[in-house]
Image: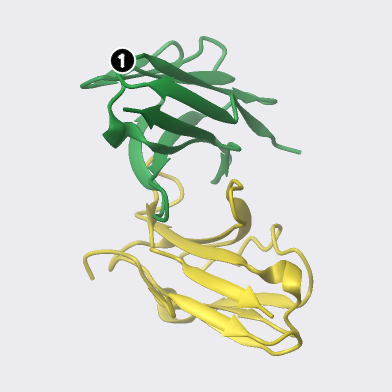
Chain colours: A green, B yellow
Amino acid sequence: GQQVMQIPQYQHVQEGEDFTTYCNSSTTLSNIQWYKQRPGGHPVFLIQLVKSGEVKKQKRLTFQFGEAKKNSSLHITATQTTDVGTYFCAGRTGNQFYFGTGTSLTVIP
Amino acid sequence: GAGVSQSPSNKVTEKGKDVELRCDPISGHTALYWYRQSLGQGLEFLIYFQGNSAPDKSGLPSDRFSAERTGGSVSTLTIQRTQQEDSAVYLCASSRGANVNYGYTFGSGTRLTVV
């Protein structure tokens, strides 16, 4: 069945360091979305990527969609304590989005 | 409403009892999804409603779980004869539609504890 995996599962970084999470699908995706879930909160939509090789930026966040549309990455430059949370990718196949396992980011001040 | 509303926010129930969880999606959103999130885990898909189509129930873990969506709006997730492994946060999400590329808007969830 459809599987979307994320690595790493956990990441601790010093404030100011960069952070990257990777998302990999077993099948080709029509598009991919990224969500952020703060501790104790619910997932909040960040962005959607549709085109092969697409790159989008939101301030310090850079999102990429692989050429084969099977993988994606989220890179945060110069992390801040406000970046703390779990980042989920969600890959779309058919009418459903399959959520990745998430990467939990801890930023040490 | 402005967001997806879920109730109750917390529910503690005894093993073997039935529970009902409610989701009120954003007005006009035709797609509604239920997910389950255990502590520190990812999101487990449960069920999906799109307009008047038959729901996609492929994620329901057992026949103790069922869901309805009345009038294309409010949805109720029912868990019968609850078990301790049902303890989790149950998240509802809605989106403008299934065939267009919109992000999901999640509710704050219902934290279910089965004791």
Is B52 on the left-hand or right-hand side of B67? left
Q: Nearer the viewer, residue A25 or A81?
A: A81
Residue at screen point 75% across, 63% down: B61
Q: Nearer the viewer, residue A88 or B45?
A: A88
Relative height, residue A102 to residue B107 (above, below): above
What residue does disc 1 label?
Answer: A77
x and y, in percent, of residue B31 in the image: 44, 59
Relative height, residue A12 to residue A45 (above, below): above
Residue type, label 1: Thr
Q: Nearer the viewer, residue A78 or A7?
A: A78
Residue at screen point 43% across, 21% down: A13
Is there any visible trace of residue B103 in the rendered image?
no
Residue at screen point 34% across, 54% down: B96
* Local secondary structure at mark 1: loop
Is there any visible trace of residue A94 in the rendered image?
yes
**Disc 1 sits on a residue from what chain?**
A
Residue at screen point 57% across, 82% down: B12
